[in-house]
Amino acid sequence: MKISLRKKLFLTHLALLALVTAAASVITHFELQKYYKDRLFRQLRIQLDEIEFLLAHGAFSDASGSLNYQKLVAYATAGAIRLTLIDSTGVVRFDSQVARDSLSSVENHLGRSEVEQARATGVGRAERRSGTIHTRLFYVARPVAPIHAGKGWLPQVRYLRLAVPLTEIEAAVRELRWQILAGGGMALLLTAVAGYWVARRLTNPIHKLAEIADSVKMGDLDAHFERTSNDEIGDLADLLNEMLAKLREDLKQMHKLENMRTQFLGNVSHELRTPIFALQGYLETLLYGNVTEVQTQRMFVEKAYRQAGRLNNLLTDLIDISRIESGEMKMSFRYFDVAEWLARQMPDLQNQASQYDVTINLQNGEPLGSVIALGDRERLTQVITNLASNAIKYNVPGGRVELGYHLNKKEVEIYVADTGRGIPGEHLPRIFERFYRVDRERSRDVGGTGLGLAIVKHIVEAHGSSVQVKSEVGKGSVFSFSLKRNLSKD
């Protein structure tokens, strides 16, 4: 059975209040009994002092000096008390509720608890049902004071004892107990109403948050958790709004990634299909076609070889970008000499440039001396090769490509400039996307995979930098990026 938070708060509050009320009632009951009995004890002690004084001065003696039994009985009856006079052996010499001729049948009182206490400590008290008159009484006893011993009728008495019925005290305590219970019940009722109101006020914002959370669960991502108070519940609403905003962003990103994945798979399928179909066509022609001339056969083999190379390049680039984007490709950062590193790239690039009737130069323009930068030399070689190869392939016959660097305060800027066709401005924001081509037909003709600049972008960003592009149609392009310098070794 599900119990709401509001009910839990209300029932817990009510149970605690009932427990406190019951405990207060019990404690008050016992404290009132103790108070009344202590008060009665003090009053009876005072009365014992008065009776002792009256007995010592003959207030209850007749003309012959003997005790006037009836007069003392009348005194006790008027005071609504039971007076008992006991000698040193425990024999009852007077009892206001026992006839004089029946005293001989009264039990010895020396063993009564209040008498024993009086003999031991000077005063004794007890409460019990009287075996003589069969009524529940409160007893107080004490020995006769030495100052009055031997006076009046007291020579025959050793202990004075007073007793009063507990009926009145018990009735008064019972009445007060009912009053306390009635007051506690009324307080419990009023507090229960107030507690329910407080519980409702506290849980209403939580209930609203739960309703909105349920709507989010059902797919309403435009929902908003309203902050209704400046407390922990308000902070919770803000936190839920932040989580919902992040969820929206994550879902948006997930849809974007899904679209990118679908597009990527489509692009990969298309890019793989082209060289595979071309390769298959050349091989089928050689196998089943009537090609007998050696020169023609060689031409088909060379074309098949180029398509196989294109396919190999595409697969290599796919593996590289997959490793980069998944974080599997780790960078090994070391300090290296930029000028010496660029010079090492020149022989291979010059061979490639000669095939396209393009001139490539290494142009420093800075004072002689080593320039030390921090980076992964192997991956940066991949970057400079991709940028320089693009500059060569998409150049014009007789064009130029220049590699070089500029020194800044704490960085070295490495660039690749060309005098090629240039890139239209509307294409610049997208040239680093996977499989994006400005000129698709020419890209395929030169064997481009559409992944080179995407790989360049990821590697450069892994070095804490970014690729900058400046291009003008008909004049050429400049690609550049910066690396941190080691000034102490320059």
Image: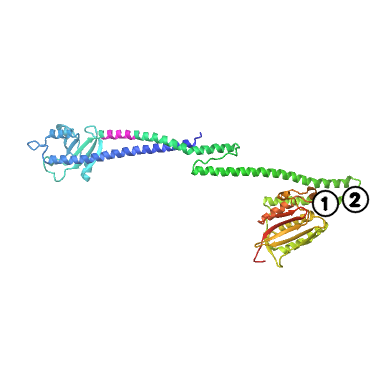
Residue tagged 2? 296
Q: Relative to the observer, which residue lies in front, 351 or 88?
A: 351
Where is residue 137 shown, x and y percent of the image? 24, 35
Look at the image and give the residue range highlighted in magenta: 169-181
Please tell me whether residue 166 is drawn above or below residue 293 in the rendered image: above
Instruction: Please tell me in which quadrant of the rendered image residue 53 appears.
Output: top left
Earlier-in-chain disc, 2 versus 1: 2
Q: Relative to the observer, which residue lies in front, 248 or 269?
A: 248
177 part of magenta stretch: yes
Q: Is residue 393 left or right of 261 when viewed as pictured?
A: right
Residue 257 visible here:
yes
Q: Which mark is residue 109?
A: none
What amino acid is found at the position of numbered circle 2 in the picture? Thr
Q: CA distance from mark 2 to mark 1?
A: 15 Å
Where is residue 319 shown, x and y percent of the image? 73, 51
> Among all residues in the image, which is located at the extreme bottom?
368
Point out the image quarter for the C terminus: bottom right
Please tell me whether residue 266 is drawn above or below residue 357 in the rendered image: above
Q: Which mark is residue 306?
A: 1
Please tell me whether residue 354 is drawn above or below residue 61 in the rendered image: below
Q: Main secondary structure of the magenta part?
A: helix
370 part of magenta stretch: no
Q: Label 2: how many residues lie within 10 Å, few (<14), some (14-19) or many (20+)?
A: few
What amino acid is found at the position of numbered circle 1 in the picture? Arg
Instruction: Please tell me in which quadrant of the rendered image residue 192 appears.
Output: top left
Where is residue 282 shown, x and y percent of the image? 85, 47
Where is residue 57 shown, x and y percent of the image? 11, 41
Q: Is residue 346 left or right of 153 when viewed as pictured?
A: right
